[in-house]
Every structure is written in structure tokens, then in C-alpha cells.
Amino acid sequence: MHTLFFSLNIFQQALAVSYTNEGMDTQAYLTLERWVNTQYPSIPPPPPSLTKNNSSLPSSSSSTSSPSSSFFSPSSDLHARVTSLFLSAARSGPSLAATRPEGDMNGMVDADVQIGLGVLYYNIAEYDKAVDCFRAAVNARPQDERIWNRLGATLANWGKSMYFTDNFSLFYFFICIHLFLLSLFLGF
């Protein structure tokens, strides 16, 4: 059951990233909200000031919304609410999580919470914060290629892909060491 629960959590995060890639921000926020509420059920809901206008949310791909009106739209209220939930989860640490993913390098940072925050900041073009979140996730789970991909994509979309080469070199080094150790173990 634990593996199934963990797989559903990975699926929800991947779905949120896919929604983001397609410009479907509202769906991404709702998916991330389901994830954080499932993974951190003891996190209290955000203050009422962040929960107004959360019914009948329009799709971010709606043709009736203009850039000037979308800044204070129900979608931005939803973004604020979900970001508040993720920040609460980050502050509480992984000890309150319903499950712990295998392979996290330390118990101080929940890589999945950092990924969710990274996606939320990416959606509003706060790339510096998104990069910080993805880097924290990489530090917690350096063997997870999905996190490296999200970090690289964020840096590239921010126009700072040259910074990724240093990070990727570290990842490549990490993989080479693992392959070397595996070859020693298997007797190659």
C-alpha cells in the first residue's frame, strides 16, 4: 500500500508539471493542492484572506482573460492559497508527511515539497525562487533525474542555462561513481 500511495503522489506531481507545461495553471494548482493535502493532512488550511474566490475557477487558458486582469484573478488567489500550504509543509519538515519517499538524502528537507514550490514559483515567473527550490530538492535527492530536469528547464527558460552545466557536471560525476561502484559489485 505504501508503494501505491507513493506512486500516486509522484503521479500527481508529474501531472501538475504537465499542466504547467501546457499553460493550464489552475489545473496545476488544484493538483498540487490535492497532493499537499494528501501528503500533509495535518497542515491547517490557509487564512480566509487566501481562500476567497476559490469557487468556479476559470481555466488559465481561457480566451476571455487579459494579462492585466489575470494578475488578481481567482487563479492568483488559488496560487496564493496553494503556495501558503506548501510553505507550511516546508516549514513543518518531512516529519509531518504521510509517507517518506525512498532515497531522500536528509530528513530536513522534503524534496517533493520543494518541487511543488518550484512549480508554483515557476508558474508566476519567479525563476530565482523556483531555482532555489529545485536546488534544495536536488540536494535532498541528487539521484532523481526528474529534479535535475526541472532545474535545467527552469534555468533555460530563465535564460541562465549556462549555470546548469556546473550542476549537471556534478550530477554526471554522481552517476559515474554509481556506475563504477555497480561494476565493482557485479565484477565487471
Image (tube, grey):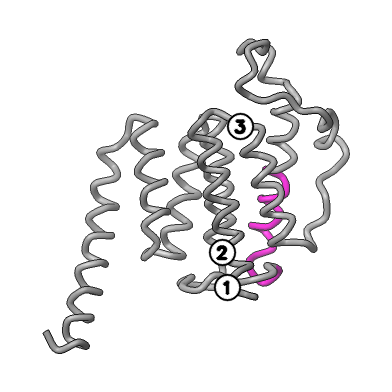
Identify residue for label 3. 25
Q: CA distance from mark 2 to mark 3?
A: 23 Å
The C terminus: image quadrant: bottom left
Q: Amino acid at mark 3?
A: Asp
> Does residue 29 show up magenta in the picture?
no
Which residue is the extreme one toward the left? 188
Q: Quadrant of residue 59?
A: top right
Q: Amino acid at mark 2?
A: Ser
- Rate crowding at label 2 as few (under 14), some (14 to 19) or many (20 or more) other CA atoms within 10 Å: few
Magenta stretch: give its range.
Answer: 83-96
Whole-percent x, y for residue 72 in the image: 72, 20
Identify residue for label 2. 7
Write the residue at 56% across / 55% down.
11
Q: Is residue 184 left or right of residue 86?
A: left
Q: Quadrant of residue 95?
A: bottom right
Q: In this view of the protein, which residue sits in the foreground, 100 or 95?
A: 100
- Rate crowding at label 3 as few (under 14), some (14 to 19) or many (20 or more) other CA atoms within 10 Å: many
